[in-house]
Image: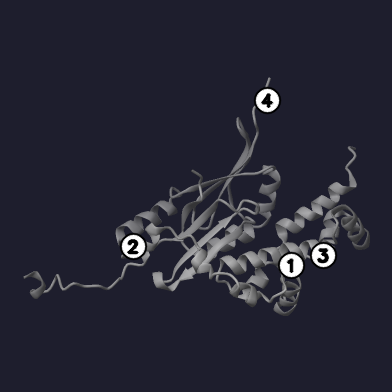
Amino acid sequence: MAFVPPARHLLRAKDLADSHYTEPLEVDDLARAAGLSKAHFSREFRRTFGESPYVYLMTRRLERAAALLRSTDHSVAEICLEVGLQGVGSFTTSFKRMFEMTPTEYRAAYPPASHQARVPACIVRAYARPQHRTFREDSPAGRT
Amino acid sequence: MKIANAQLWVHDQDEALAFYTAKLGMEVRSDVTLPEMGDFRWLTVSPAGQEDVAIVLMAIPGPPMMDEDTTQAVEGLMAKGFAGTVFLTTDDCQSDYEQLRDRGVEFTETPEERPYGIDCGFRDPSGNSIRLTEVKLPATA
């Protein structure tokens, strides 16, 4: 059987965090993916990648949450769920620890998502047209 | 010149969003609803790590943007599977196929060897075709 470097198993767990962070994934699931006990996994992960698996996963989630706050009009509660977290309270606490402001304050610090959305001019023209206008062109007076 | 966005018509934007994110694993790049444009919703997604190109998941407009006949024609093309196709690449077609199948994606073609690599095909909930290819470069002498 071919030798597999131990770090390959850790990388598998790291990839799982990157690709499945939207699901209610925990360190236990990452350790399982690496085929290691939770304590051993956490120790080896930190030694290999320089941070604990919990911090890695949380950083991934918060980075995505920040992007969603800037680029969508989803509510803070929706974004919390979208990045795989369950409680808005703990989400807000973790977010503030990383960005030094709450999710709501973070959103307010950037231009509204609707200003950043690069909706092409052809679509704006089509959708922003008034829908119920009349110049009385169909009335007898309007034809004169 | 670069590709920024390409558009797909979808029957239901929420359903499409759930499919492209929860099932395919893409990320939302933009999702805003604009009241000044009759609640037009600009919704884009793209794969993680590929933020410069996105798919616009566009609801089919009714009148006055699109007349009734055209709306029905677009819906008809979608129903028949001729509205649009997205071509995706992957490092491991078989592995992705198994993962997506387990998430409930309905495949129209299972992974098969082709001259250019291995690929398979499936549809999104609106009937748009998606091909997933593991490209194999020809051996060089």
Q: Residues within 10 Å of mark 3 (few under 14, many from 20)?
A: some
The picture places residue B11, in percent across and down from the top left corner, at: 46, 61
Q: In the rendered image, which quarter contains the C terminus of chain B? A: top right
Tell me: residue B83, above or below residue A66: above
Chain letter for mark 3 = A
Q: Find the residue positioned furthest to the top.
A: B141
Q: Is there CB contact under 8 Å for labels 2 and 4?
A: no
Dot 3 falls on a residue whose secondary structure is: helix
Nearer to us of marks 2 and 3 is 3
Circle 2 or circle 1, nearest the eye = 2
Q: Which residue is mark 2?
A: B65
Q: Residues within 10 Å of mark 1 (few under 14, many from 20)?
A: few
The span from disc 2 to disc 3 (Cα, nearest Å) is: 49 Å
Residue B139 numbered tag:
4
The type of residue carrying mark 4 is Ala
The disc label shown at residue A54, or none: 3
Q: Which mark is residue B104?
A: none
Q: Earlier in the sequence, mark 2 or mark 4?
A: 2
Snapshot quadrant of residue B105: bottom right
Is circle 2 on the same chain as circle 4? Answer: yes
Q: Which residue is mark 1?
A: A24
